[in-house]
Image: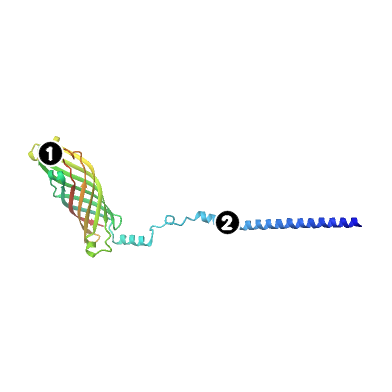
Amino acid sequence: MQGYISIFKFRAHLRNLFVAKIVTWALRWDLIFFIVLGLFFSLPYAFSQNAATEEAPIAGPYSEYGEFDSSEDEAQDEKFFQYGRFFGVGLGSGVTTPTGNAGKLYQGGFPMVDLRVLYWFDFLIALQVMVQNSKHNYDAPPDGLSDVNFFRFLGQVKYYIDTRDLAAPVTFIGPHFIFGAGLYQRTDNIGSGTGTTSGDNTQTLQAFGVNAGIGFELTLKPKKTYLDLEGMAHFVQFSDQFDPKFKNVGILDRTGTWFTFGAALVWTW
């Protein structure tokens, strides 16, 4: 009898252990099933979110397309298109004079001829291409009376001072700064005033130089006609800059800064 009871308990214990294993196994697979089910429904959403993130540009000032950076820039450009100038041509005259030892040697310089073409980027900045020519002379031994032609081909940037918050008279004169560089050519017809000049006595020198100046722009007819009053300093050094050719008359070399002062009538559209 005792043996049957032991067998019964052993079988009950096996049954309970088996049921526990089954329950544990079922619970484990139920958990795995729900995890797989959750992944099944969440993966498409995750992939769609990842694709949208990859396709969407990074937000920032360089990622968003726009012709204008801000509404203020847009308004300013619209104002320039309506009231600004784009191109211009000008014709002017003035005087060219050097300083230093060059000023002691070279005389004349009036009238100076000035031709220019302009392009405006906005209200404040313009590009200017200019051609200037002036005639000079000197009379010093051993050359005697000689004629000189001084030619310049210049590229310049004009920066107009923003006068919106300044007084009306300042706004009217349109103050601006000029910075540029270009090719300078000086041709000396040595002895031309004595009647002894020839092709062998013509000396042509070229050099690269820079220039800077200030100007005022008077409005004669808005968007149509303007009068430019400008003064510029030209810094250029020719190959004979330190030639002591005229030291016997107290001119040790040809050093000096060239200045131009002129007025130009500019037509714009």
Please tell me in which quadrant of the rendered image residue 71 appears. bottom left
Residue in the foreground of this view, choosing between 255 and 147: 255
Image marks 2 and 1: residues in contact by CB distance under 8 Å: no
Provide residue 188's location: percent of width, then percent of height: 15, 40
Provide residue 264's location: percent of width, then percent of height: 19, 54
Residue in the foreground of this view, choosing between 8 and 179: 8
Nearer the observer: mark 2 or 1; the answer is: 1
Judging by the rendered image, the residue that carries numbered circle 2 is: 46
Q: Residue furthest left?
A: 194
Judging by the rendered image, the residue that carries numbered circle 1 is: 247
Which amino acid is tagged 2?
Ala
Provide residue 117's location: percent of width, then percent of height: 24, 51
Local crowd at mark 1 within 10 Å, few (<14), some, or many (≥20)? few
Local crowd at mark 2 within 10 Å, few (<14), some, or many (≥20)? few
Question: Is 104 left or right of 173, judged from the image as shown?
Answer: left
Q: Quadrant of the N terminus?
A: bottom right
- Residue at x 54%, y 55% (from the top left corner): 50
Question: Is 142 left or right of 76, judged from the image as shown?
Answer: left
Local secondary structure at mark 1:
helix
Local secondary structure at mark 2:
helix
